[in-house]
Image (cartoon, helix red, strand yellow):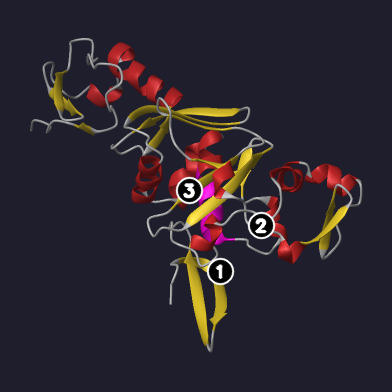
Amino acid sequence: MLLYKGSNTTIARSKGNRTQRDEYVHGLISPSITYSKKLMNKSKLSRSVMDAINFNYMDIHRNHGESVDSITVNGKKLLKKDLPSIDTDWCSPIQAINNTVRFENGNYYKYTDRSGYTHTFACDHDRINQPYSDQLAGRQNNNSYQITKFWNMLSGDGTYLGLYFSAEEQKQMLGDAGIKEGFFCVESGSRKQEYYYSNGNAGVCVRKFEYDATYEMYNKRGSALFKDYPVGSKFTFAGQEYELKEDRTIDIPYGIDIFDVQFPKMRT
C-alpha cells in the first residue's frame, strides 16, 4: 500500500481482493498509482489525433464534438475511457538549458519522480497541465497537479510558492530540472519570470527584481539596519566577510547570495 501524505484527498483503489488506499498530502511530491511503467507503452492513437484532443479541444467543443462518454476527432467517435496515455517518446524532459526552464505551447513534457513514476504534461495557453486526454479518461492525479502548480507558479509569480512547497521540495524540483544556484528563469509560452536561487532567509526562489532592490540597498543606498554598527563591522554573505563602509554601504559582488547573511554581534 502506498500512502501519500498531504491534502484531504483520499483515493481508494482495488487490486485483486485487496483495497489500496492512497492518501495525498498537500505539497509532497510523491509517486502515484496512476503513473507506472505502463505509461511507457506506445499510444494506440496517432500523434495528430492526440494533439487535436489536447491542444484543439476548444474547436472540438465549438463543433459539439464532445459528449458525456465520447469525443469526436476528425469524424471518428472515441470513447473517453479508452483514450491512451501520452506516448513518452513525444515528451521532452523538464530540463533547464542555461539555467532556464522553458515550456512551449503545443508540446508535451515529462517528469520522472524519485520512485520511478513518469508524469506527462501538455503545455497549452501558456500553462502546463495534465493532458486533456488523461482528464477525459479519468486519470486525474494529485501528484501531477502539484508538479504543474509548482512550474506554473514560477512562470507567473512565485511570491507565495513557500506556502505550498517546503524549501526541500522546491530544491528537489529545481535540482531535478538541472537548475543551479544563482539566477534562473522559468518561461511558459508568453509568461516569464526571473529568480535568484537562494539558501538564505528570503525563500528559495526570490524574484530577480527583489534581489536587485536588496543589492542596491546594500551597495548604493545603505540601510537603517546598519546604523548602529560601527564602520568596519564585518558582515558575512554566503560565507564571505565584507566590511561596513562610512556611508553605511557594503561592497558586495553582484550575483552572490545576499540573503544568506550573518550580522555581527552588537557591541554592548
Image quadrant holding the N terminus, namely bottom left
Q: In the image, which is nearer the foreground, mark 2 or mark 1?
A: 2
Q: Which residue is mark 2?
A: 134
Residue drawn at 68 percent across, 56 percent down: 44
Q: Quadrant of residue 219?
A: top left
Q: Nearer the viewer, residue 90 or 134?
A: 90
Q: Position of residue 238 (x, y in %)?
A: 21, 30
**Residue where numbered disc 3 is placed:** 111
**Tag 1 residue:** 9
Give yes or no for residue 137 being in the magenta stretch.
no
| Amino acid identity at mark 3 | Tyr
Determine contact: label 2, label 1, CB under 8 Å: no
| Residue 143 drawn in magenta | yes
Q: Quadrant of the C terminus?
A: top left
* Disc with the residue nearer the chain's start (2 vs 1): 1
Instruction: Name the residue nearer the viewer: 192 or 69.
Output: 69
Q: Which residues are magenta?
A: 141-150
What element does badge 1 sit on?
A: strand
Give whichever of discs 3 and 2 has the lower sequence position: 3
**Amino acid tagged 2:** Asp
- Most distant residue in the left direction: 268
Prevalent SS, magenta region: helix
Residue 210 visible, this angle? yes
